[in-house]
Amino acid sequence: MNGAEALLKTIVAAGIDVCFANGGTTEMPMILAFDTVTGIKPLLGLFEGVCSGAADGYGRMKEKPALCLLHLGPGLANGIANLHNARRARTPLLNVIGEHASWHLEANAPLAMDIECLCKTFSGWQRTVRSAETIARDTADAIEAALRGQIASLIVPCDLQWKEYQGKIPAVTSFTCDRPDRHVIESAAKMLKSAEKTALIMNGRALRRRGLEAAARIRAAAGCDLYCINFPAYVDQGVGIVPLTRVPYFPEPAAALLAPYKAVVLAGTDEPVNFFGYEGQWSNPVAADVPKLRVDGDSQDAAEALEALAEELGAPGKAAIGKLVAGYKVPDVPSGKLTPETACLTLAALQPENAIIVDEGLTTSMTYFPLGATLAPHSYFMLTGGAIGQGMPSATGAAVACPDRPVINLQADGSAMYTVQSLWTQAREGMNVTTLICSNRSYNIINLELQRAGVTNPGPRVLSFTDLGSPPIDWPSLSKGMGVPGVAVETAEDLAREMKKALREPGPHLIEMIL
Amino acid sequence: MNGAEALLKTIVAAGIDVCFANGGTTEMPMILAFDTVTGIKPLLGLFEGVCSGAADGYGRMKEKPALCLLHLGPGLANGIANLHNARRARTPLLNVIGEHASWHLEANAPLAMDIECLCKTFSGWQRTVRSAETIARDTADAIEAALRGQIASLIVPCDLQWKEYQGKIPAVTSFTCDRPDRHVIESAAKMLKSAEKTALIMNGRALRRRGLEAAARIRAAAGCDLYCINFPAYVDQGVGIVPLTRVPYFPEPAAALLAPYKAVVLAGTDEPVNFFGYEGQWSNPVAADVPKLRVDGDSQDAAEALEALAEELGAPGKAAIGKLVAGYKVPDVPSGKLTPETACLTLAALQPENAIIVDEGLTTSMTYFPLGATLAPHSYFMLTGGAIGQGMPSATGAAVACPDRPVINLQADGSAMYTVQSLWTQAREGMNVTTLICSNRSYNIINLELQRAGVTNPGPRVLSFTDLGSPPIDWPSLSKGMGVPGVAVETAEDLAREMKKALREPGPHLIEMIL
């Protein structure tokens, strides 16, 4: 076997069975290895941001890495925005990048770039393979690093992929979290018991079912309010799960909401950070003099830490927290001209049990999250690192991870255009993804920022930065162009009808919600 | 005025009048400055690769920088692939990136990235603004750096954009090339006179009209053969201009073609490099023991160096080189089912005088370049750094640079999908760009590489890396979705009819050439 086959066999042996890829000449041996090494399926993305975003969505659903295979520096560069989002989500992700043959590097061929420098900006672990003899071990090390909830980038020169490999295929050691720190847990319990008004702010594993059960018990014991950060990586939501409040996006309402708390316990996240720095505001919504304590470290499991905290507090068992968890309540389908609010209500009214909601709706979807608590159980995830163009690719990856679950992508139009090529991969694989385009024909968040900056009457050149309406994007045509049937709607009734149809029919669909 | 206005005024004072932009909150003061500072037009791209590629195309046509305005690390990352192409083309380009407020950086907000690290991979010059007092001087320094034919990246924290600026608007010193080095010119002349068979291989300013006139005179005096590198940044072509041979893409034909030469003179380029390293081949097509001499340095003008060389050789004046320059000859419009060859012939037959041909046709356009020599004078440019997705954006930028000239983008389908959002900007501005999609529904270059690797019967998983045919992209629908009228053709006759129509009607058009 050659180096590429050794690499791929190591990957398959570690249980990775999907590869989101856009390869080229420097990855030729790895591409060819997909015919000789079985057990892993390659999926083509027509732009690398699709591949990296899909790997992020896959990783968030499965809590295990997919392989993302990219072509040299430029291919990697195209994937960076969504790798940045994956880093912020702490998604486990194995990122393999082909490099020129080692001996060809100094010639400075047209495609040559400093790949290692690019990798530094998003990788938790990175290495360039230096010898064919170490290629399998390097790959195993990369996977072990990825399993810790980070991006592991392995740069593989083409000549080493071709070279004969005579070693063994190493087994990958699965990652075992460190146990919670008893002293920290005791301190957190004391903090919750002694302060008069406390908040528990969460992200990461704290927001999956097990963590949320523990959070409900902690609330039952200590009376603390439960929050998630503004851009959570993943949330289990719905009936039977304790409801959460999201820390608001803008600094003023975030600071106002959190101002009453005398102590803040954190799980799966450091203290919340304002998305942007505005003059006259602090960087963080919780005041500097409020005591804060994080119950877990990066190598610990936030859910386990919350369970330990619940025990420390002598919290009731999960059977006794019925009053705290959400009951079942589905809104009626609204009627009339679509607005952001009625679009969110329609989605909430119709989303099937076990749906995966991928929310990059931005200003349109602001009212959706609070509706989720009382619906049938579902997964919810969103843009984590602010690099727009994450929704469509990660919905694609989520559909690969969970082919039996309906995926609904609530998707801002401006952001959708960043990685619109995702639709083609959805069509190619017949994925059950329904994309709801929030067609407000504007970078609306910038309009809000203009208002914040006190600009009441911006001129045409300023508006040209935010206006997506000339020409309006014809989403059904765009979607059809990539093999996904699409339709445009203007009322809640029409949206409801088309959503039902899309969810009934197999394969991807797109609905442009003209707002 | 605030810092952002000082920055923009410095840019306008330097004669930069176009900004390809996709901005956000951290660029808000710069966005607002477009309403108060006149003399520069912002053009929105719906993905940063469109902005950076358009700035590249603009810079290649005008030989002066456009402003590229990007949003934080992720926005910059999305622009890197085409910034890499621009770097390889030595395009003058001013790249301004907004950064979080200085005081907000340590909070590590979701969008925070190491922007300086990203910039290192493509910038010839870079600086982060550290004080509002220096913002205009920093901007002027950046422009002066860009004028040297490189990417100058200026990172501007948001708080410094807002701050009051009380200084002057500095004037930018235009870049004056160093004079050619007499010793080098004399050595090159000796080399051309003494070796029995010599080649002159060119890129950069050597390939513009003035350089090519000097090259023709050198050929007349010394009998050397004239080449351009495989991926030239820009070539003036057509009747009255000396014809060139492109160094072939694959190493074997390149080495075979260049093997007879006993000495090689270089202008505007270092020695040619093979695009990829293949086992059994060298990194360069010219043998290591063949003497090579470059007549210019990076701070010199290759055209001026060639003129000096022509004088040193006692070459005849340009009036006396009539036999060497190309005569006028236009191929007939072919007929029948479209092939790569008949597509290129049809384009050559119908392209108007003074057209700008942007060639990212890759395997489809391989036969086009040699046809250009005998046509009406036109500009030709292409993918320089191998980062696909350059054609559509740079055609967009070329149309901004030269609104009175027809732009024809010969465009591979797979590459087109990378930055397909360009069509929207073309529609928005009503640009005279005709896009000819080479619809072979494949990453065909990878198929050629499979053949080279001896793979005669690749399996379905390998083919899934190259197949763009399931589903086929419906280019007219995709194009319509972004406001550009599109049509698909299968014969040369239909292509000719639709090309004539597209070139007659103002505004952008797309023709899918089904191959």
Image (spheres, coloured by chain):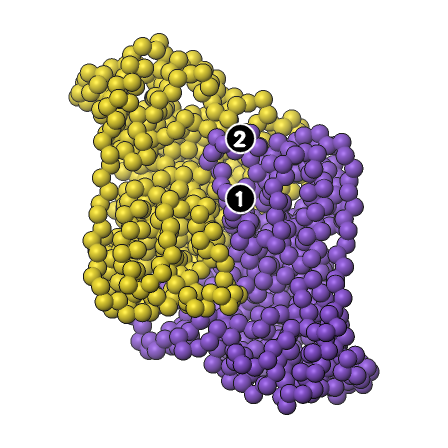
Chain colours: A yellow, B purple
In the image: residue B404, left or right of residue A127: right
**How many angstroms separate mark 1 from mark 2 (CA)?**
15 Å
| Mark 1 or mark 2: whose residue is earlier in sequence | 2
Quarter of the image for residue A452 reads top right
- Residue B503 appears in view: no
A150 vs A366, left or right, is: left
- Is there CB contact under 8 Å for labels 1 and 2? no
**Residue at mark 1:** B115
Residue at screen point 51% across, 47% down? B117
Q: Can you say whether A219 is above or below A55 in the image? A: above
The crowding category of the residue bearing disc 2, from other C-alpha atoms within 10 Å (few below 14, some 14 to 19, many at least 20), is: many
Mark 1: which amino acid? Ile
Q: Nearer the viewer, residue A418 or A436?
A: A418
| The residue positioned farthest toward the bottom in the image shown | B196
The x and y percentages for residue A257 are 45, 18
| A168 over A373 or under it: above or below | below
Residue B131 in the image: state x and y as whole percent.
65, 34
Instruction: Determine which residue is flagged by label 2.
Output: B104
**As shown in the figure, which amino acid type bears the numbered disc 2?**
His
Q: A126 or A480, which lies in front? A: A126
Q: Secondary structure at mark 2?
A: helix
Q: State which quadrant residue A138 falls in.
A: bottom left
Instruction: Please report, as a chain letter, where disc 1 is located.
Output: B
Using the rendered image, report if marks 1 and 2 lie on a common chain: yes
SS state under label 1:
helix
Q: Determine if residue A356 is in view.
A: yes
Q: Residue at x 42, y 30 (%)?
A: A230
* Residue A390, image x, y percentages: 43, 44
Q: x%, y% of residue B229? A: 59, 73
Residue found at x 71% / y 65%: B300
